[in-house]
Each structure stands twice: as C-alpha cells, then as structure tokens.
C-alpha cells in the first residue's frame, strides 16, 4: 500500500523536492507500513515558499472578493467530486476509519472553502462613520503572508480551515502539516491550483520541530495560525509576539461534559462516546471529564459499558470499522502509560485498558477505555491524554459541578446534557470555555466560531469571526472643508 506524492513540497503551483532535508517516513498506523518517504524543508525551501507567497499576494488582494470566492467555491466542488479518493488518503495518513473520513474530513474542508468563498464579498465590508461635515470609513485589509501549522488528527480539515479564510481575505499562505500526516495537504494545494488559484498563494512544505521556527520567525510572515498542544502553542506565541505578529492558537483541552439526572440517557451516553472515542479519541475538544449526577451514575455506567464494548475495531478501510488505530506507536504508548497511571491512582477500570486481542501485527490499536470513580486530583482527570480514554466523575448538584468543571487551566470546550433548558443555558453561561454544546457534543459546522479560552488558546476558526483574524482594520478620515490651525 503506497501513497508516495510526486515530491515533498508544493510551492508556487508545482511540486518541489530537496533531498537535503531530513527524511520523514509516512507510516500507515493500521499496519506499520511505510507508505511514503518525504523530506523536511531545508532553509532554502522555506525561503522559496515564503518568497512565492509574498510575490503572489498583492495581486490576489487586489482582486474583488467575489472573484476570490469563485475560486474557493470551485475548489469545494472538486473536493466533493473526489471525496472517496481524498477520504482514503486521509485514512492512510491518520489511521482513522473510512466510515469517519468519508463524512467528516474532506467534506468539512470543502464546506470551509464553500462557506468562505460565499461570504467573502459580503463579510469584508467596512463602516461609514458620519462626523458632521467630515466623515470616516473603515475597511478590512489582508495581513499578507500567513503561516498555518497543522496537527495530525484532522490534516485535510485543518489545511482548509486555515487556508479558506486566509485566502478569502486576500492573503497568501504557507502551510506546514504535521510530520505524522504529511500527505493530505499536498492534495489540497493541487486542487486549489486546479480550481484557478494563482500560483504561489497556497504553498505546502513538510517539516519537523526545526521547521516551525524558520516560518514563525521569518520577517515576511505577518500571521501564524497553529493547531497543536499547549506547550507548542506557548513557544510559537512567544516567538510571534517578539515580532508583534498576529496569531491564532487552537490548543488542547481537558473539557467537561456534564450529564444531569434528567438527561436523555441514551443521548448523553452517545454524546460522551462521540466526545471520547471518535477519531480514536484524538480530538482536542473531547469531553474527557464526564460528570454524571449520582442518581443516574450506575445506570449510565452500565449502559456505557455495553455500548463501548460493542464498538467495532478493525481495518480502517473496512466501512464496518468504527475505531481505527492511533496515529503512531509513540502516541499509543503515551496513552497506555496514562491508563496505567489511572489504575495506580485508584480509578476503577470499567472497560478496555489495553490492546485488542484480535488485532495483530504492527498496527497501533488500543481499546476504547472507560474509568469510573475518577476524582478531580487524579492525573487522568487533569492532563490531556489525547486517546480513547473516558473519565467518569460523579457529582451532587449544579453549583458543585460548575466549580469543579472550571477548575482546570484549559478552556477549549464543554457540554451539558439536561432536559431543563433554563438550567442548560445557565450552566453554559458559567462554564469557562470557548465552544459549548447543549444536548450535543463535538459538532463544529463551519458556520459557527470554534476556539478556546484560558490555556486552550485564543482567536477563532470558522464563521465570519475567522475573517477578523486574517485581516486588520484600516480607518480613513475624510476632511470636507478647509483646515484651520491656530498657528
């Protein structure tokens, strides 16, 4: 099974190679097979990509938003036409089941191109400000060259979530995917050029830890948008701040999902499972601290155990498979270590906790795992695990659970399940998170803003709000009379 691209990088509308860069092996997580070998960007490659973006951006910015939007909408059409091909590549890249990727990955990327292509003409307007005889007006102007740094859990989606608003606003982008999932973004770049995007506006370069600083510190880069961990986010934000660059940080979380005793039990369990096991638990917004009111705790756990143990684990290319492998052996080992810590600190292992017996070979599989009787001070309740590990905690009343839910450095997401909508809104209003769900979880349509608070980052992706993070406001004062001066 091979997925070797034409070359490692896509710059100025064509594939580019520089074999002097460190070798990056793309490994299919289901088998451990090397499916592609690429090279990390050398400093020369970084310079080439940024130079192409800088050259192409002014002419693109001078185009009407309608013309820019037309190209993005065509890219969305092409992505939808090739959804199966792109989904299979995403499965090879990440190990996520084709059952997921075919409905959640390229399609959500296409949604992003379509949405921002559609609103570009209407959302990039300024204001007219009357000042008596004089007046002023504002306009939103692009920032210039933007850098996107992606994560490995949704590589195609992230490439589009960052590229679509940046391009719609008149910017150019240099995108660096995770070295764990290097393949999908190259196809996105190909499709954009096919759709009519001028060369140089969307460039993809591969890289490792040494590549990010070359991009972030480059004097021609105006903005950096990162999806990643909190420690990485702090480093990138600090480097960008040193040169006063614009930044968007979409970082990690340890999000609470609160289930009150009047909630629909099956829906709440379904939400908790989607918020912990989808994409093998590798989702930053996951509700990994599931607070269940004591009255329904045992019924919740009993049914949760049944449904979790019925999850189909297997070949990601089989559409019956519901849970695939983790992205890498290192990530699986990290998650298994957290599971051992949970057991040693006294959490009750309800189900899972190891490697599936029926899976052999080099695949990085892990069982969906549920811990019960988890307490707030346990490591598994405080640190982001980023794997299919659900922690179930119990609580007595609303004030208690709100205080405990907020007792974390993170603030990405939160969820509430209850039949009492007044309580749902009241609790949502008190929870310290950027994105919240009521009687749902982990839905992120492009129409709504997505992003965090506290240590989970700042700035927003998706929705009209994202355009504000890829533009800056210019104010023009217009004097209509003669200038009078006291001297």
Image (spheres, rainbow, N blue to C red):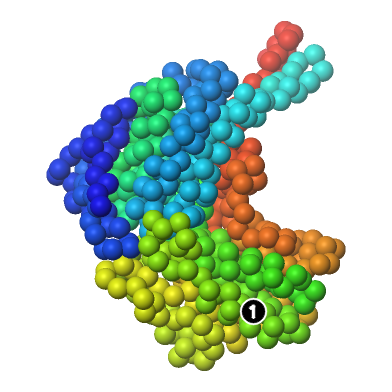
Q: Position of residue 56 (x, y in %)?
A: 38, 23
Residue 89 visible: yes
- Residue that appears at 58% across and 74% down: 307
Q: Position of residue 261 (x, y in %)?
A: 77, 77
Compare residues 357 and 365 and report the one nearer the observer: 357
Q: Residue at x 31, y 27 (%)?
A: 12
**Left or right: residue 418 compared with residue 453:** right
Name the residue: 39% across, 77% down. Answer: 356
Q: Nearer the viewer, residue 128 or 69?
A: 69
Position of residue 383 measured from the top left corner of the image (x, y, whole percent)? 49, 74
Residue in front for this viewpoint, 221 or 117: 117
Q: Mark 1 points at which residue?
A: 303
Determine which quarter of the picture holds residue 298.
bottom right
* The furthest residue to the top: 482
Q: Is residue 2 left or right of residue 414?
A: left
388 and 81: which one is in front?
81
The correct choice, above or below, for 178 with respect to 299 in the image is: above
- Residue 211 seen in render: no
**Considering only vertical position in the picture, is 297 above or below 360?**
below
Residue 4 figure quarter: top left
Badge 1 element: helix
Q: How dense is the environment of label 1, judged by Cα within 10 Å: few (below 14), some, or many (20 and up)? A: few
**Residue at 72% from the left image edge and 61% from the top image edge:** 438
* Left or right side of 15 for 196: right
**Image location (x, y in percent) of residue 25:** 23, 54
- From the image, which quarter does the C terminus lie in? top right
Question: Can you tell which quarter of the image residue 16 is in?
Answer: top left
Classify residue 135 as left or right of residue 239. right
Give the vertical position of 234 relative to 365 (above or below): above
Please give the count of numbered marks on the rendered protein. 1
């Amino acid at each position: 099974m091979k997925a070797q691209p034409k070359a490692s990088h896509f710059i100025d509308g064509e594939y580019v190679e520089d074999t002097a860069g460190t070798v990056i092996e793309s490994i299919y997580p289901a088998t451990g097979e090397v499916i592609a070998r690429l090279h990390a960007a050398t400093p020369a490659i970084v310079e080439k990509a940024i130079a192409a973006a800088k050259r192409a951006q002014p002419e693109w910015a001078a185009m009407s938003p309608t013309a820019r939007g037309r190209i993005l909408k065509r890219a969305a059409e092409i992505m939808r036409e090739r959804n199966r091909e792109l989904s299979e590549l995403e499965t090879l890249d990440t190990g996520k089941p084709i059952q997921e990727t075919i409905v959640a990955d390229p399609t959500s990327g296409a949604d992003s191109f379509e949405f921002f292509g559609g609103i570009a003409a209407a959302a990039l307007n300024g204001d007219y400000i009357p000042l008596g005889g004089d007046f002023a007006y504002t306009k939103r102007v692009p920032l210039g060259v933007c850098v996107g740094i992606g994560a490995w859990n949704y590589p195609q989606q992230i490439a589009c979530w960052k590229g679509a608003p940046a391009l719609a606003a008149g910017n150019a982008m240099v995108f660096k995917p995770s070295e764990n999932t290097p393949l999908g973004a190259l196809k996105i770049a190909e499709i954009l050029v096919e759709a009519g995007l001028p060369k140089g506006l969307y460039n993809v370069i591969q890289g490792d830890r040494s590549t990010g600083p070359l991009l972030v510190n480059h004097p021609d880069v105006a903005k950096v948008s990162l999806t990643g961990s909190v420690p990485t986010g702090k480093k990138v934000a600090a480097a960008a701040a040193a040169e006063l660059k614009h930044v968007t940080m979409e970082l990690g979380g340890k999000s609470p999902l609160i289930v009150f005793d009047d909630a629909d039990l099956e829906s709440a369990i379904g939400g908790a499972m989607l918020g912990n096991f989808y994409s093998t638990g590798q989702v930053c917004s996951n509700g990994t601290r599931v607070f269940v009111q004591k009255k329904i705790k045992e019924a919740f756990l009993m049914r949760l155990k049944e449904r979790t143990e019925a999850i189909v684990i297997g070949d990601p290319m089989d559409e019956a498979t519901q849970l695939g492998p983790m992205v890498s052996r290192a990530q699986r080992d990290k998650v298994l270590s957290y599971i051992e810590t949970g057991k040693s600190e006294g959490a009750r292992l309800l189900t899972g906790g190891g490697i599936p017996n029926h899976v052999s070979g080099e695949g990085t599989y892990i069982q969906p795992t549920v811990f019960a009787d988890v307490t707030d001070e346990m490591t598994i309740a405080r640190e982001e695990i980023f794997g299919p590990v659900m922690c179930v905690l119990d609580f007595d009343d609303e004030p208690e659970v709100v205080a405990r839910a907020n007792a974390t450095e993170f603030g990405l997401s939160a969820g509430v399940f209850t039949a009492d909508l007044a309580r749902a809104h009241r609790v949502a209003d008190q929870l310290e998170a950027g994105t919240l769900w009521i009687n749902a979880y982990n839905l992120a349509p492009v129409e709504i803003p997505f992003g965090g608070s506290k240590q989970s980052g700042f700035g927003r992706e998706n929705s009209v709000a994202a355009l504000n993070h890829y533009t800056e406001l210019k104010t023009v004062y217009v004097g209509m009379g003669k200038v009078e001066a006291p001297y």
